[in-house]
Image (cartoon, rainbow, N blue to C red):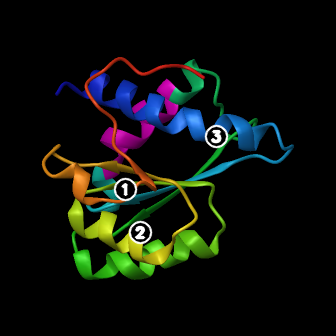
Amino acid sequence: MKRRKFIALLGGAVAWPLAARAQQGRIPVIGVLRPNRQHVVETFAEPFRRYMKAIGWEVGRNIRFLFVWTEGRSERAQALASELVAQNVDLIITFGDPAIRAVQGATQAIPIVAMTDGKNITRYNSQIVSPTTERPKRF
C-alpha cells in the first residue's frame, strides 16, 4: 500500500472516535505506540500530522499526539502501553501483533486502532478497529 493511501486510511480510522470527545471541551490525546526506533518514525509521524491537520485536527488547537517507541524491542511494548494508559489517552494507535497485544492487555476501555498486514484481524476483540482499503468516512 502506498504511503499516502495508508496515512489517509489511518487518519480516517482515527478521526471518528475523537469527534465526540473533542465536543466535551478538552483536547483529545492520541497515543501512538510504534515498534521501530524513534528516528525511523518521522517517515510516519509528520505525514500523519499533516493529514490530520488537513481534515481539521490541528496539534495544540484540537488534538495532541503522544508518541512512544519500542526501539525494535517488542518486550518494551507492555510497559509503553501501560504508560499510554496512565497518561489517560483517548485513543491508541499501534502497529504489529506484539504491540497490539500489549495495548489490549493494558486497557479494556480505550479504543485501539490496530495497523497490521491484514491477516487474522478478527482474532482481536471489538475494542480494536483496523482500517481497511475502503475510502475513510469523515464524521
Q: Earlier in the sequence, mark 3 or mark 2?
A: 3
Q: Nearer the viewer, mark 1 or mark 3?
A: 3
Q: CA distance from mark 1 to mark 2?
A: 8 Å
Residue at 15%, 45% (x, y): give it: 117
Q: Position of residue 74 (x, y in %)?
A: 24, 75
State the residue at coordinates (26%, 82%): 75
Vertical arrangement, residue 65 with respect to residue 35, above or below: above
Figure quadrant of the N terminus: top left
Is any atom of residue 71 visible in this view?
Answer: no
- Magenta stretch containing residue 10, yes or no? no
> Horizontal placement of 54 versus 129: left or right?
right
Q: Is residue 65 above or below residue 69?
A: above
Task: Name the residue beneath numbered marker 3.
Answer: 18
Q: Which residue is mark 1?
A: 94
Q: Nearer the viewer, residue 39 or 94?
A: 94
Query: On the rendered image, what quadrant is the C terminus found in?
Result: top right
Label 1, residues with CA under 10 Å away: few <14, some 14-19, many ≥20: many
* Pointer 1 with pointer 2, Cβ within 8 A: yes
Q: What amino acid type is highlighted by mark number 1?
A: Thr
Q: Quick one: label 1 or label 2, which is nearer the N terminus?
A: 1
Position of residue 16 measured from the top left corner of the image (x, y, whole percent): 57, 33
Dot 2 amino acid type:
Val
Upstream in sequence: badge 1 or badge 3 = 3
Which residue lies at the image location 59% right of the left edge and 40% below the top edge?
A: 17
Q: Secondary structure at mark 1?
A: strand
Contact between labelled residues 3 and 1, with CB atoms less than 8 Å apart: no
**Range shown magenta:** 41-51
What's the residue type where badge 3 is placed? Leu
Using the image, tell me which numbered label, if any, was put on residue 103.
2
Circle 2 sits in a helix, a strand or a loop, which is it? helix
Outermost residue toward the right in this view: 25
